[in-house]
Image: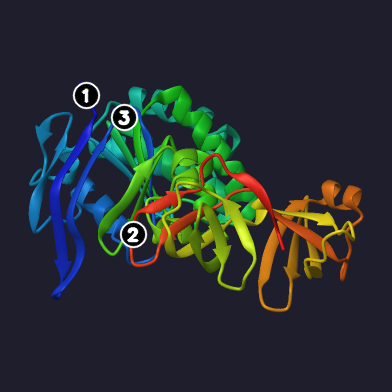
Amino acid sequence: MSTEITISNVSRGFNGHTVLNDVNLTVREGELLALLGPSGSGKTTLLRLIAGLDQPDSGSIAIGGVEATQAHPAARGVGFVFQHYALFRHMNVFENIAFPLRIRKTPKGEVNVKVTELLKLIQLETLAGRYPAQLSGGQRQRVALARALASQPRVLLLDEPFGALDAVVRRDLRRWLRQLHEEMHITTIFVTHDQEEAFDLADRIVIMNSGKICQQGAPIDIYQHPADVFVHEFLGESNHITGHAAGGIVFADAGFPVAEAANAPDGPLDIYIRPHHVLLRPRTGQNDTGWIINRISATGAHARISVGNGTTTLEASMTVDALIASGLTDHTPVDVIFAGGTVFSSGASAPQKLQALKPRLAG
């Protein structure tokens, strides 16, 4: 039976405030999809509507081609994992996982076999007798996931599943969940506001803001081709420069050229350049551009570099190894080369990607 999810013209409001506004989305069978966006964008509300924990004001939801808008949550074949686990504190790990099976009056022998399989799947076989208070956050989240899988759901929904965990545990659990998905191929939707989490896990990302879908697509496509200014600014750091185009050259309003871009329309522009596209070279002396390194801060394997010329300050980034090899230090005079970017015509939402960009020395 198909597990494709079709959301058609769904709207939902609370106390006169629109939370979802005419949302349309198809989740493909076996897909791992991320709903990504800031707080209040409508992500969790959409997830709850799919689960049947809430009802839309208008529109419809179908699962596997079958209308499910008014169906009881138990009839939808959906497993739901909450951010804060929602485990039963008075039950041990085994009984927490067994709970949905016992509710369905599954024979005791089948319960034992199924729970044992799930304990092995989540790699907690030796902790079956422990209680939630005796587990780490990552272990509790694995138990919550196993409990959701116990009833063999057609669809798995996860609401900020790693939000309460520290960075190292989140990273390990993401890798584990991705491997689990590749083994089981359950149609899965997870809600997050963490961009790294979405890019690391999802087959496809749906970016939401103010109750609407702004853009959807493969992680790399969204990052490389943002649909509008909101998406670009939301997905990672970027240098924002006001500028203009003239004769196929993009200039910053501060006076220095940014790029050669024949496709950039003449007129005012908003220019966005990712830090890794700001390339720094020790100044040759032949071209006094005025750029100088203000400060270098190393964060693990990468370095963040603040560079300025008296009127404009930019953030650049490079690996620590490349930084050491370059010989750059605080207060070093440098040449700045822009190797990529995106421009938006002022007042317009559609981007103009700087394609076939010829890196240009900013001087």
Apparent side of residue 314 relative to residue 70 in the rendered image (left or right): right
The color scheme shown is rainbow
What's the residue at 9%, 50% (across, down)? 59
> Where is residue 339 drawn, in percent x and y?
65, 48
Q: Type of residue at label 3?
A: Gln
Residue 292 in the image: above or below residue 179? below
What's the residue at 75%, 68% (across, down)? 307
> Where is residue 56 drawn, in percent x and y?
12, 55
Rounded to the nearest angstrom, the CA distance separating label 1 from label 3 is 14 Å
Can residue 241 be seen at all in this image of the molecule? yes
Which of discs 3 and 2 lies nearer the camera? The answer is 2
Which of discs 1 and 3 lies nearer the camera? The answer is 1
Q: Quadrant of residue 255?
A: bottom right
The kind of secondary structure element at disc 2 is loop
Residue that mark 1 sits on: 2
Q: Type of residue at label 1?
A: Ser
Judging depth in this view, the residue of 94 and 363 nearest the camera is: 363
Q: Quadrant of residue 57?
A: bottom left
Residue 152 in the image: above or below residue 54? above
Residue that mark 3 sits on: 152
Mark found first going from the N terminus, 2 or 1: 1
The kind of secondary structure element at disc 3 is loop
